[in-house]
Image: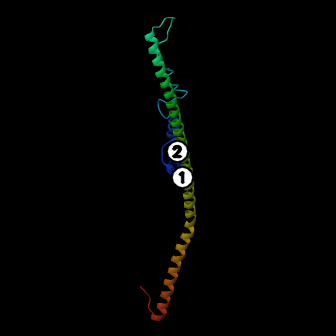
Amino acid sequence: MGTMTTLFGGGSSKDINSKSKTLGKATDATVITPLNPGKFSSVRSTPIVEAPRYFTKEETDAMRALAKDKTEGARQAKRAYKALSKIEEADAKVHKSHRAYESNVATNELTKKRADVKHAKNLHALRPGYARLGIGLEKAQSDATARIEAIRTKLLGEVKQ
């Protein structure tokens, strides 16, 4: 395992490559992209009149009523598509803000991990000093024990066994 894997987990560089492929995918399978241009369909409320013809009064009245309905429907469709566009813009702002937040978290996590490593290096640098303290304490204890034994020998004339 590499240093980065050890520090941050995860697998090999193949995982990074697969994540790059994932990032290239659209947020939804039906979203419009250069590789997914969508369907070039259209709305057609009436069939095309292919040749000149005469219309009856009933046909004309029905078409005028349909035209009125379609005109109102077009006005509502325009309003709905405008609202849908605003929703998409809001979604994009939230998405962008969330990605900025995630980037900030990742950047600050790196700052924290760097501080941890700096602290750990500092602690390791102190180890020789602590080792010297231990040796100094052992020497002081040994010296004190020897002096105590010397005093005991002088006072009592005994040697400790």
**Residue lying at the far left of the rendered structure:** 161
Relative to 152, is 93 on the left or the right?
A: right
Measure the alpha-carbon separation of dots 2 and 1. 16 Å
Q: Is 96 in front, or is 104?
A: 96
Q: Is 154 in front, or is 28?
A: 28
> Tag 1's secondary structure?
helix
- Residue depicted at 54% across the width and 49% down the height: 106
Tell me where residue 40 appears, x and y as whole percent.
51, 21
Residue 139 in view (yes/no): yes
The C terminus: image quadrant: bottom left
Q: Is 35 in front, or is 134?
A: 35
Tell me where residue 99 appears, x and y as whole percent.
54, 44
33 over 149 or under it: above or below: above
Residue 157 quadrant: bottom left
- Determine which residue is flagged by label 1: 109
Residue 25 in view (yes/no): no
Q: Is 28 in front, or is 149?
A: 28
Tell me where residue 93 appears, x and y as whole percent.
55, 41
Tell me where residue 115 appears, x and y as whole percent.
57, 58
Residue 112 quadrant: bottom right
105 over 133 or under it: above or below: above
Q: Say whether disc 2 or disc 1 marks the residue closer to the N-terminus.
A: 2
Q: Are marks 2 and 1 in contact (CB under 8 Å)?
A: no
Disc marking residue 98: 2
User: Which amino acid lies under the numbered mark 1 shown in the image of this protein?
Assistant: Glu
Q: Of circles 2 and 1, which is in front?
A: 2
- Residue depicted at 48% across the width and 25% down the height: 72
User: Which amino acid lies under the numbered mark 2 shown in the image of this protein?
Assistant: His
> Tag 2's secondary structure?
helix
For label 1, count other residues whose C-alpha is less than 10 Å away and answer few (under 14), some (14-19) or many (20+): few
- Residue depicted at 49% across the width and 31% down the height: 80
